[in-house]
Image (spheres, rainbow, N blue to C red):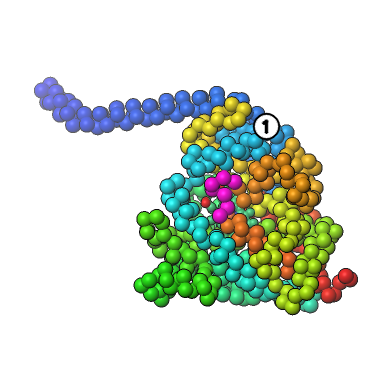
Amino acid sequence: MLELSVSRLGFGLVAASPWLLLLVVGTSWLLARILAWTYTFYNNCRLLQCFPQPPKLNWFFAHLYLVPPTEQGLRKSTQLAANYSHGYLIWFGPITPMIVFCHPDMLRSIANASGDGLLLSAGDKWSRHRHLLTPAFHFNILKPYMKIFTKSTDIMHTKWERLITQGHTRLDMFEHLSLLTLDSLQKCVFSFDSNCQEKPSKYITAILELSELVAKRNRQIFLHADFLYFLTLDGWRFRRACRLVHDFTDAVIQERRRTLPENVDDFLKAKAKTKTLDFIDVLLLTKDEDGKRLSDEDIRAEADTFMFEGHDTTASGLSWILYNLAKHPEYQEHCRQEVQELLRDRESKEIEWDDLAQLPFLTMCIKESLRLHPPVTIISRCCTQDIVLPNGRVIPKGVICIIDIFGTHHNPSVWPDPEVYDPFRFDQENIKGRSPLAFIPFSAGPRNCIGQTFAMTEMKVVLALTLLRFRFLPDKEEPRRKRELILRAEGGLWLQVEPLSASPQ
Ligand code: HEM
């Protein structure tokens, strides 16, 4: 009996030892991780102590609901920028600190460090792609797009004239300008005309659906994990829309590859002389120093990014510019006269590339609107190394930094009377002595918006032509701003629109 139990015991020990070893190693590893994490956490807390903090809701939620994505939240952002003019610390729950920057002096450290110190995605891949994409935004490529912007604007105007004749004088700017920017982008990226401003297009519907789903998912913190999200109906809709968008882009790339002759460079260079090169052409043409080109998958990803980054942002920019001009008829009239003066002796009422520099007041109005209503309100970066600020404070590695574009643009220590729409802030005289980081609608540093010249060009063309033909007046109700992926208005941004011939001059 005894022998049996001993042998049993012995057998058990031998068999259990690898498991026991594994358990001991596993537990030690876990303990080491917990200890390391606790040490880092306390060390970070110590370093972050010197940053001012707004009062917490409680220890668990901390500042989680401090700034909701509503009108009230945006007012709170403005108030925080006024109270903590150089930035502040917030806790996203009990253990996640974030530093919010809303002053140019502090932003300088982040903007300069964003080359290697601060990364959003894999740094090497990003910098190679950024280098390869830059030629796509060269002014020689952008110049012929002026005609595309003009054509898309004409289509929108024809639609507005029809709607106004039918009695619809109140129009939602976001709805119309989103279709216009999508129409232009689809032509500039793929040379594809879906006629989406006049009739529904499956591709455009999918892009709009994806933008809406991404904004919705952003608000649902528990659905941030992919495996949970893809179990929901929205997750299924997201997958379906993604598939449709990818299939469209793939088909264009495959078709282009099929028709391309062996010598791509000569063919595309010849095409560039006679015809507009779209972004797909440029991406097919581009290669790095070693002669390596982008793969089809890379081209698809970049083309899709242009569609997403480019349409909502520009539509938001344009919608708020028209809103601000509706609120300030004197500036609206000044812009209109500037355009009329420019085109006075011309038969064709088209804006040419060289005209863009001849619209200084209109440009000032656009910039002041991008200050007051920046389409992208915040961006975030994760520190991949400690960052020392000019005042000696240290942001420890691993902490998330929020570049509060909206807060910086509404900070009274940077912009006196920040809520007032005053285009003369961007007068040559007034720009002198102001930090370039006081105005950052397109972000700053090496990861800034690659499409900013494209966007500014499109906004100038659309605005100039639209002011020639229509007058804008505010709607009865003040819009309530809403922070989604871009700055929107609750229920749309409605304005009264009058064709100019029908209104007193
Ligand atoms: C008024 C219009 C626009 C605004 C306000 C805007 C704003 C921005 C901002 C703030 C960023 C930085 C995002 C970050 O760092 O997280 C960004 C990045 C980017 N934007 Fe724009 N954008 C506009 C239009 C466009 C257009 C028209 C395109 C393309 C046709 C475009 C393409 C991109 C791309 C590809 C990036 C990523 C750049 C990179 O990571 O290197 N954007 N944009």
| Front position in the image: 335 or 397 | 335
Instruction: Report the front residue among 80 and 227.
Output: 80
Q: Is residue 24 above or below residue 211?
A: above
- Locate residue 112, reporting x and y percent: 55, 40
Predominant secondary structure in magenta?
A: loop
- Which amino acid does the dot numbered 1 rest on? Pro
Q: Residue at x 19, y 27 (%)?
A: 13
* Residue 202 drawn in magenta: no
Q: Which quadrant of the view contains residue 341?
A: bottom right
Q: Is residue 448 on the magenta stretch? A: yes
Q: Looking at the picture, tell me which residue is in the foreground, 31 or 374.
A: 374
Q: Residue under label 1, please give it.
A: 54
Magenta extent: 444-450
Compared to residue 126, the image places residue 502 above or below, namely below
* Image x and y of residue 322, in percent: 75, 61
Left or right: 188 as drawn, with respect to 347? left
* Residue 177 % position (x, y): 67, 65
Viewport quadrant of the N terminus: top left
Mark 1 Cα-neighbour bin, 10 Å: few <14, some 14–19, many ≥20: some
Which residue sits at x=67%, y=32%? 54
> Is residue 378 placed above or below 451 in the rendered structure?
above
